[in-house]
Image: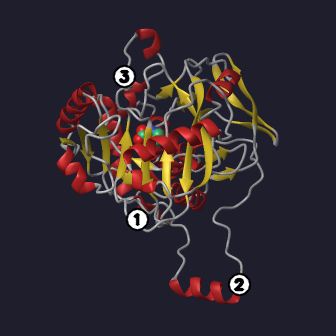
Amino acid sequence: MRARSHPPRPARYSGFGLLRRGLTGSSWPPAWRRHEIRHRYDVVIIGGGVHGLATAYYLAAHYGVTNVAVLERGYLGGGGSGRNTAIIRSNYLTPDGVQFYDRSVRLYESLSADLNFNVMFSQRGHLTLAHSDSALRTMRWRAEVNKLQGVDSSVIGPAEIAALVPHLDVSDHPRFPILGGLWHPPGGIIRHDAVVWGYARAADAAGVHLHQGTEVTGIDVSDGRVRGVRTNRGHTAAPVVVSCTAGWATNVCDMAGVPLPITTFPLQAAVTEPVRPFLDTVVVSGTLHVYVSQSDRGELVFGASVDPYPSYSTRGSLEFTEGVAAHVLELMPALAPVRILRQWAGLCDMTPDFSPIMGRTPVEGFYVDVGWGTYGFKAGPAAGEAMAALLANGTTPDLIAPFYLDRFTDGRLVGERGAAAVGH
Ligand code: PYC
């Protein structure tokens, strides 16, 4: 397929334009357009989150493939991309995982410039606390794997931790005293909606069709090959269909006759009322099943590990609120007066080895970018870039080769449980 150096740039909003709209109340131009569904696309992408949009954008930007549709059942970014805690990092445990997520961090670093849209990436550092000797041992292992892959990551002691995060209780009073931590300076947080909007408007500007409110009801397969997609808005033919879904990946792949080794769990999160900026790192405790960061608005963002039972529920539970509050206060007792504002849940498609599934399937022309567990958002750019390369060139990039579907029958697992998230 044809390579292109510069995709069309989306419109730029000048400072004067901002002022004029603020003063006159005139409406903003839509960031992306609405279209009728074409009878045929070269590529249909199912899922309008960061993975689907990034795949569409890189197909257009890097390969000039623009007869592409992104089908989203709800609204763009309304699934996992809008329901995560926006943490970016690459301090994984396996060399395959570290290389892959490091590529994503690097793409995130230049994303505002690439998309001409401020995604507010704040590389404030990511600190994972160890409260036991076995946690410290895993961190040393991770730090060595990270360094060998050129990723900045090291084990630090309580004194350095206290200097980085003065509000942490590093005394020996807590139930689980802090023995050390894995410090990863390139990690941080980002404005997750902005990433979705930036990719969406850039893909739209390049000619991609973004179809919201468009539910896939069937995938047509005959003679071992994908033929098209049925939706609540009609049928479209396509020689290439990619599932970039989270939460419903198994249901969508079942439509193509491709079973996935995935179980879906909710992951809950919460934010507090805004408080003055005091926390400029991301703090994670696997033992306490909690992570905390402070958003640019001043809210504290709390997350936990996945709920202990499979479900498709995206409602919050009181059990989670009580647990997360208790655990945060064990780490930072000074937060006791701060009130929780709201909470939500996202759906996590967990694979047996805690690594994603990317690449071909037994159905020719049907590809997957799924199984993103609790680590999908941070992977969006690298997954989109690599999936676009696979679709355009027909060869699987080395970066994603280890994440092939058949590894679960071959036994070549990419065991990422020790670094995938918290509390596993
Ligand atoms: O893997 O960094 C992570 C993460 C944060 C929240 C859920 N997973």
- The answer to which of marks 2 and 1 sits earlier in the sequence is 2
Residue 25, disc: 2
Q: Nearer the viewer, mark 3 or mark 1?
A: 3
Q: Nearer the viewer, mark 2 or mark 1?
A: 2
Q: Quadrant of residue 258?
A: top right
- The answer to which of marks 2 and 3 sits earlier in the sequence is 2
Q: What residue type is labelled 2?
A: Gly
Residue 229: where, in percent of width, then height? 72, 33
Residue 48: where, in percent of width, then height? 62, 46
At mark 2, the secondary structure is loop
Q: What residue type is labelled 1?
A: Ala
Residue 113, disc: 1
Residue nearest the viewer, comparing 68 with 179 = 179
- The answer to which of marks 3 and 1 sits earlier in the sequence is 1
Q: Residue drawn 65% across and 84% down? A: 21
Q: What residue type is labelled 3?
A: Val
Residue 61: where, in percent of width, then height? 47, 54
Give the answer, above or below, for where 332 lies relative to 309.
Answer: below
Asked if disc 2 and disc 3 are in contact, CB closer than 8 Å, the reply is no
Residue 414, disc: 3
**10 Å crowding of disc 2: few (<14), some (14-19), many (20+):** few
Marks 2 and 1, Cα distance to the nearest angstrom? 28 Å
